[in-house]
Image (spheres, rainbow, N blue to C red):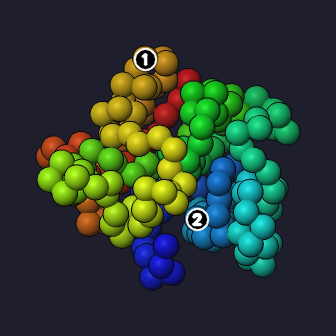
């Protein structure tokens, strides 16, 4: 993904994290969000990342980061150890989604999850009319090299939460970097959910 790509979901996440909250950012990448939360919200916490270069980038930013596979469990952390656990554009790249969400809600008092919306009209158009898997600025990968394992829509995640007894405290769909309310499952490019047990 281009370095010039701006993550509008980071604005929402930053606004939703309480001042001074303890945070665990799973799949934190180069630590951009964690650094922003530390700077703007006074957050303290950790990132967990598997990629060597991303872990090094986090360390270079002065962040607390652990290298590991989040799907191996979060046994290092006690129940309710963090005010907020963040899965920012991470959940769709995991294989054991339900087990991971259970662990996230065990170690966090709440969680913020951001997802690409595979129900967006452009995705539907590329697949339905073009007959090919979608490629866009927000989904820049070809079908054969995508890190995404699960392709869900905003509605899919709502149904998942309802089926698993997870409370959705708030949600927002973003299009062009702005919150939208009209036809979010068709028009939203990205969704941000705050969930709790």
> Between marks 2 and 1, how big is the CA–CA gap?
30 Å
The kind of secondary structure element at disc 1 is helix
Viewer-side residue, 12 vs 192:
192
Left or right position of 103 against 188: right
Whether residue 84 can be seen here: no
Which label is found at residue 62? none
Viewer-side residue, 16 vs 7:
7
Q: Nearer the viewer, mark 2 or mark 1?
A: 1
User: Residue at (74%, 72%) from the top-left corner?
Assistant: 53
Viewer-side residue, 48 vs 111:
48
Give the quarter of the figure containing the C terminus.
top right
Pointer 2 residue:
33
Number of dots carrying numbers:
2
Q: Residues within 10 Å of mark 2 (few under 14, many from 20)?
A: many
User: Residue at (61%, 32%) from the top-left corner?
Assistant: 96
* Position of residue 161 measured from the top left corner of the image (x, y, whole percent): 44, 25
Q: Is residue 47 above or below residue 183?
A: below
Left or right position of 183 against 95: left
User: Residue at (39%, 52%) from the top-left corner?
Assistant: 116
Q: Image quarter for residue 30?
A: bottom right
* Position of residue 191 measured from the top left corner of the image (x, y, whole percent): 36, 48
Left or right position of 184 against 39: left
Left or right position of 95 against 159: right
* Position of residue 62 measured from the top left corner of the image (x, y, whole percent): 79, 74
Q: Is residue 27 above or below residue 32?
A: above
User: Residue at (33%, 66%) from the top-left corner?
Assistant: 136
Pointer 1 residue:
163
The kind of secondary structure element at disc 2 is helix
**Could you tell which of marks 2 and 1 lies nearer the N-terminus?**
2
* Position of residue 47 measured from the top left corner of the image (x, y, whole percent): 72, 56
């Amino acid at each position: 993904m281009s370095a010039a790509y701006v993550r509008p979901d980071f604005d929402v996440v930053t606004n939703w994290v309480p001042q001074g909250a303890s945070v665990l950012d799973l799949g934190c990448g180069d630590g951009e969000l964690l650094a922003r939360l530390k700077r703007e919200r006074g957050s303290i916490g950790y990132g967990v990342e598997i990629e060597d270069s991303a872990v090094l980038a986090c360390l270079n930013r002065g962040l607390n980061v652990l290298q590991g596979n989040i799907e191996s469990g979060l046994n290092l952390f006690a129940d309710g150890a963090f005010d907020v656990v963040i899965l920012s554009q991470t959940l769709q790249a995991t294989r054991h989604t339900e087990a991971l969400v259970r662990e996230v809600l065990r170690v966090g008092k709440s969680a913020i999850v951001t997802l690409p919306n595979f129900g967006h009209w452009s995705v539907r158009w590329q697949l339905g009319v073009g007959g090919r898997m979608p490629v866009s600025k927000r989904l820049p990968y070809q079908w054969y090299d995508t890190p995404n394992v699960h392709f869900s829509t905003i509605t899919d995640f709502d149904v998942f939460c309802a089926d698993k007894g997870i409370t959705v405290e708030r949600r927002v769909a973003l299009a062009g970097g702005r919150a939208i309310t009209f036809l979010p499952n068709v028009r939203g490019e990205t969704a941000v959910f705050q969930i709790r047990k």
